Structure formats: C-alpha cells, structure tokens
Amino acid sequence: MTVGRLAPTPSGALHLGNALAFGAAWISVRNAGGKLLLRMEDLDRGRAREAVAQGQREDLRWLGLQWDEEVLCQSQRSYSLEGIPTWRCACSRAQRLSGACRCKEHPPEHGNWRFDPPPGEVVFEDRAWGTQRVLPPEGPILQRADGEAAYPLAVVVDDHLDGVTEVVRGADLLEATALQILLHRTLRQPPPSWLHVPLLLGPDGKKLSKSEGSMGIRQLREAGWSPDRVWALLLPLIGCEPPLERARMEPGPHWHRIWRVEEGANGPLLHPFGPIFGLDRKTSLPQPPPTDSIVRF
C-alpha cells in the first residue's frame, strides 16, 4: 500500500507554499488509494507550540486535506545513533569551514554527533525532476550536544517506523534527499520514493516563510477566500485541474520549478521563474514574464 505523510513544523501558521506541497502529497496518495499520515515535526521544543499545531490542523481540515489515523508527534519518540558511523565535534561552523576542525583525530568529550557518510555522490530518481546526482553534505549533525536528535536522523527513522513509501515535499529539499537516502541505506531500510513540487518565493525572492502573513492560509480564510479558490490558484502549478477531490497529478518536466508570489488587488498572483538551482539569491531577481503567463484567479 502507498503510504504518504504531511509533516508540518508547528512553529508558525501554514502558508501557500505549505498548501501546495501538502496538496500534492494528498493527491498522490489518494490517486493511489493509499494512506496519508499527519506527523508533527515538533523536535525543536524552543519553537514548537501546541496552539500553532492546533491551528495548522484546522487549516489542513479547512483545505480538505484529511489524514488517516491518529496524529503522530516526533516529541513523543526517541532516536538512536546505533548502527550509524558518527564522530563527535565541538567546533563552530566557522572553524569547520576554515579547516581548523580536528575533532575526528582528537574527539572531544562534549559536542554534536556528526554523520560520517561514505564518499561519492548519491544517485536517485525524483518523479518530477528525473535522475539526480547529489553529493551529500560533509559531516551533517545527527544529534546535538544536548542529546536532541537533528532533523535528518529523526525524519529517516520516522518514515521507516511509520511505513512511509513516498515523500512529497517542496523542491528546496531536493538536495537534502541525498543525505536521507544514505541514512536509510546505513540503517538497512528501503528509502521511499521522492517527488519535489515547485517552490514558492515571496516578493523579496526568498522562500515563503511562516512569517509571511499576507500569504498565510488563515489570512486568506479571514479575507473570505474559499478552499476551492485556493486550489484553483495552486493546482495548475502541479499539472492538475480543480477541484481538489477530482484532481489527478502527472508529475513531469513541464512543471515550473519556482514561482514568485505577489499580492494583487484580489489576492496572490504567481509568476513563473524557472529552475530552482542556479538562482542566485544574492542578486536581483529576473524580470517577471509577460502578463499573460501570470496565474490569476
């Protein structure tokens, strides 16, 4: 059976980018007749809030994204490094980047536990982007000095425990897939399949964030939008026709990789911007396309 998951972090309200990724995950699972789980990724106890989690669940229900079974929470689980090659490091990011780190040769008593991955690139298939060849990051943190598991470890363990067979998420996490595949292999568990959906950028050229209030699902609800109106805006970005209940997705290279979201007189407007990699966030954004290519509702 196909098993997918929605995995929001309860540190801020859901926005249009979340809705696009979660909608794609919902459609993919429902098209396959599978099961969809809701997992709250609340490991960051300093930022996770139960009130925010409740608001996110309300927004998901309002959007029509119902899940199966009880809600899962990372904070209720424990994570072990057993079977994973790691080393302890007490260096700062600046020290590591400068080449001053010697923790592998002289392990400190305290510090973060870092993954020691095998050399070489990771090759995998993405359902929309095709064959990917990615070098994993060097020495990523799997467990922090305080004993708290880091996201790469937690998400891999969770997906295995929950029986997840496919992961659908935003394209900004495409490169992170390589590390997760390596961890799945290290733990001798089959990785899920992957599908990365177009990324939405705010007017400043940065990924939509939970602080981008004008693009929040709750703000659109309060402005009088209906769920159908939200999906009429978003579904064409993943090759679907509304309504959500009858949407069928056929991932392929025709997808635009990045969209810039702007506020129009009647709500958000979306401009296609092309590939996600190669976009230099430090320079000015490309000129927007002709008006007739803007997605409106």
Image (cartoon, rainbow, N blue to C red):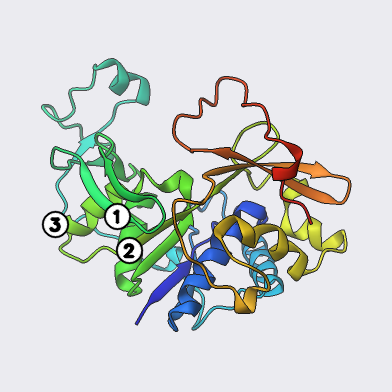
Label number found at residue 125: 1
Locate residue 76, reporting x and y percent: 43, 68
Judge the density around disc 1: few (<14), some (14-19), many (≥20) Cα neighbours within 10 Å: few
Judge the density around disc 3: few (<14), some (14-19), many (≥20) Cα neighbours within 10 Å: few
Q: CA distance from mark 3 to mark 1?
A: 26 Å
Q: Secondary structure at mark 1?
A: strand
- Could you tell me the amino acid type at mark 2? Ser
Q: Which residue occupies 14% across, 57% down?
A: 83
**What quarter of the picture does the C terminus occupy?**
bottom right
Q: Secondary structure at mark 2?
A: strand
Q: Which residue occupies 25% across, 54% down?
A: 181
Toward the viewer: 77 or 196? 196
Residues tagged 2 and 3 counted as in contact (Cβ below 8 A): no
Toward the viewer: 59 or 175? 175
Q: CA distance from mark 2 to mark 3?
A: 23 Å
Label number found at residue 83: 3
Quadrant assignment, res 218: bottom right
Quadrant assignment, res 120: top left
Vertical arrangement, residue 129 with respect to residue 29, above or below: above
- Could you tell me the amino acid type at mark 3? Gly
Q: Which residue is mark 2?
A: 193
Q: CA distance from mark 2 to mark 1?
A: 8 Å
Locate residue 272, reporting x and y percent: 62, 42
Q: Earlier in the sequence, mark 2 or mark 1?
A: 1
**What quarter of the picture does the N terminus occupy?**
bottom left
Instruction: For marks 3 and 1, give the one nearer the viewer.
Output: 1
Locate residue 121, reporting x and y percent: 20, 40
Residues tagged 2 and 1 counted as in contact (Cβ below 8 A): yes
Judge the density around disc 2: few (<14), some (14-19), many (≥20) Cα neighbours within 10 Å: some
Q: Is residue 84 visible?
A: yes
